[in-house]
Amino acid sequence: MTQQKQYSQNENSLIENRWDDAHAATLSEPELLLYRSNLLGADMRVTNYGGGNTSAKILCLDPLSKEQVPVLWVKGSGGDIGSIRLDGFATLYMDKLESLKPLYRGEAHEDEMVGYLPHCTFNLNSRAASIDTPLHAFVPFAHVDHLHPDAVIAIAAASNSKALTETIYGSEVGWLPWRRPGFQLGLELEKLAKANPHLRGIVLEAHGLFTWGDSAKDCYLTSLEMINKAQRWLDEQLQEVPAFGGDACQSLDSEARRAVAARLMPVIRGKTSQRQRQIGHFNDSAEVLQFVNSQSLRALAELGTSCPDHFLRTKIKPLVLDFDPASANLQQVIDTLDSQLAAYNADYEAYYQRCRHADSPAIRDANPVIYLIPGVGMLSFAKDKATARIAGEFYVNAINVMRGASGVSQYMGLPEQEAFNIEYWLLEEAKLQRMPKPKSLAGQIAVITGGAGGIGRATARRLLSEGACVMLTDIDQHSLDEAVAEFAGAFGADQVAGVVMDVRQEEQVAAALSSTALAFGGVDILVSNAGIASSAPIDETSLAMWQHNQDILSTGYFLVSREAFKIMKTQQMGGSMIFVASKNGLVASANAAAYCTAKAAEIQLARCLALEGAPLGIRVNVVNPDAVLRGSKIWTGKWKEERASAYNMSTDELEEHYRQRSLLKRNVFPEDIAEGVYFFAAEASSKSTGNVLNVDAGHAPSFTR
Ligand code: NAD
């Protein structure tokens, strides 16, 4: 699960010292490294998600020799210092790392050094060492931070970065020209630091900052001092300079921005999900708007991002959409999106062909990750929600860098061959290949109505466990908040969202589906499930009771499926709708005419939509539960008493009654219904539409024919 980092309360303030001596006094050396890492990594201005790394050289007891030996503790491959735990650090014998130096055959053989790192492992630690390990090992200080602070990268990405480093830091901080991280860069850092013992850090061109200290606290304070120095200097220089050359257009108001994004996202998603389904994220923060509204937008966007961490997440270039907030030409943007995307794809393919080596991995998805929309904000798309959100955050880092660098100098992207060498680095490719296989619903977006109820929650849990993003909707705000919090805890806050929606209210339904498009990019799966139950003999069935059932079950299912259908049609990616109806929609039940009739309408509606949806690849199927007592709110109220009295028994006897009534002599639980829903959502049922699946432990009158 990926944690969301925070910008501090006042984004313009300097980074504040949060070191607590009393707490630090209780910590061991590895714990001090962890403490320092988490403090630094909590602020995105210090380092972006997964970016940067920290280390300490610590004396540890060798399990074989029983002697104290120096061990390098360094952030392991793929970790994030903000959320890292102790087991996220790789541990390596310092003497073995030193013994790699004679084995190094020069720059052309950089990559083979990575293969030696596992041989240096201390204490059988299974955490893989990252390619930055030699950088930390060879800097001749006990505590080393390598960070990607926006303020320092702004200096590092300026065309006169070396001179600016000197202006800001004098002789305290050294400078090294751009070099891809690895063994060679480690040796160069060591050489510069040893030759200049007065240095307190080194700026890496187009990349970031190295700082060090004799203790964890020293190192932490030095990192903050250097970042704040750069920030203070930039603030002074930028005071009089309009950011990005000033405004070229004005933002739409917040509601209008969200409306544009919600309309665009399913269109983009549909056009860019050929290789894998994309999930979207929208960001209209102040710094994004300042950039997308600016005079320099197109020129700077074209230069690409600089820090390798940035473009690995964002691709080198974003796509700037031709939206004009003054004329609100959204339809025109949609109509010309194909040609804008084709031009972007062609440009990316040409870059791949220009820069590829004989052994380069095959070209990856050529679609953009970042979309910039003047007056509206930024969209980011990736294989899952966290990756899309984080890509957007990285582009915010890139915006901050461009604002600083272009304000005090000329901003430089990385030379394209260098960028390519990182993007298609064989070691990077190996990392991608090691990723676990995606889950069966990865990249899919589900909306569940009545999502705070028994069957709704069980369904949400099932779909989330298969990797889907879930928008829970319900009329009951309190239960909804509770359910969203529960699932955010279990599956990560990125994966789930909630919106209050009464399925009877046309506007609320349209707004909830629009919120889903905005939250995730579109809709692939609709689970129409919100419901109630009522019981009364026909002569005691009031018009209000009849209407209530019709409104929620019949009309509600119609409204929700119509709005989801529209988005699915826009996406042109097919889709699956699952109606949770009832066996009472198939068989008549005494004293429940209003409910049974409305449930029958649901089933017939599903069949009609299956017919209309088929040419678009939209499947519509029905799951019929029966007697799901546990977890269901329906079964806590009057319905339970009425059913018990209809069968002349106490409410406690009902569960057993239904079990005995079933052919299989089993009770049905919300999880059983969820399994049926999952089947219809998943690829396994891709050739089924217009079907009805009873999940009722067997009930002969409900057999379909
Ligand atoms: P539940 O009461 O636990 O959940 C239903 C949810 O729908 C609740 O959270 C409720 O707040 C919500 N809801 C009610 N009216 C709404 C409205 N107007 N707009 C939006 N949300 C609304 O019940 P459950 O057992 O989970 O039932 C889910 C579905 O399964 C219902 O359609 C029900 O008819 C059907 N069903 C249940 C059973 C059973 O035995 N539990 C049997 C057959 C069919």
Image (spheres, helix red, strand yellow):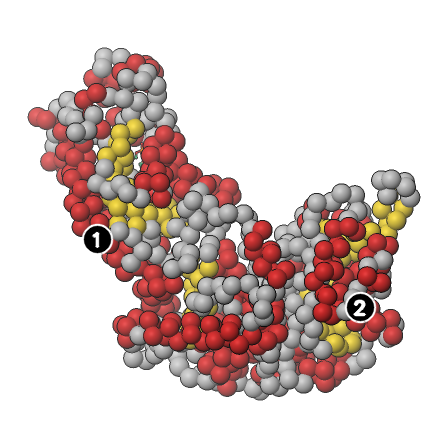
Residue 88 percent location from the top left of the image: 68, 49
- Provide the residue designation for mark 2: 187
Whether label 2 lies within 8 Å of ligand 1 gets the answer no
Q: Position of residue 340 (x, y in %)?
A: 37, 75
Q: Quadrant of residue 42?
A: bottom right
Please provide percent x and percent y for residue 598: 16, 36
The residue located at (43%, 67%) in the rendering is 367
Using the image as rendered, state which of residue 649 and residue 492 is in the foreground: 492
Name the amino acid, label 1. Answer: Pro
Which of the 4 quarters of the picture holds residue 409? bottom right
Q: Secondary structure at mark 2?
A: helix
State the residue at coordinates (51%, 68%). 315
92 vs 565, left or right, is: right
Q: Secondary structure at mark 1?
A: helix
Q: Residue at x 16, y 35 (%)?
A: 600
Residue holding disc 1: 615
Ligand 1 is within 8 Å of the C-beta of the residue at disc 1? no
Other residues around mark 1 within 10 Å, as few (<14) / some (14–19) / many (≥20): few
- Alpha-carbon neighbours of circle 2 within 10 Å: few (<14), some, or many (≥20)? some
Q: Label 2 to label 1, Cα distance in Å? A: 62 Å
Horizontal arrangement in the rendering, residue 281 relative to residue 615 (left or right): right
- Compared to residue 194, the image places residue 652 above or below, namely above
Mark with earlier residue (2, 1): 2
When asked about the image quadrant of residue 264, the answer is bottom left
Identify which amino acid the numbered label 2 is placed on: Leu
Whether residue 438 is visible, yes or no, is: yes
> At 26% from the left edge and 41% from the top edge, which residue is drawn?
688
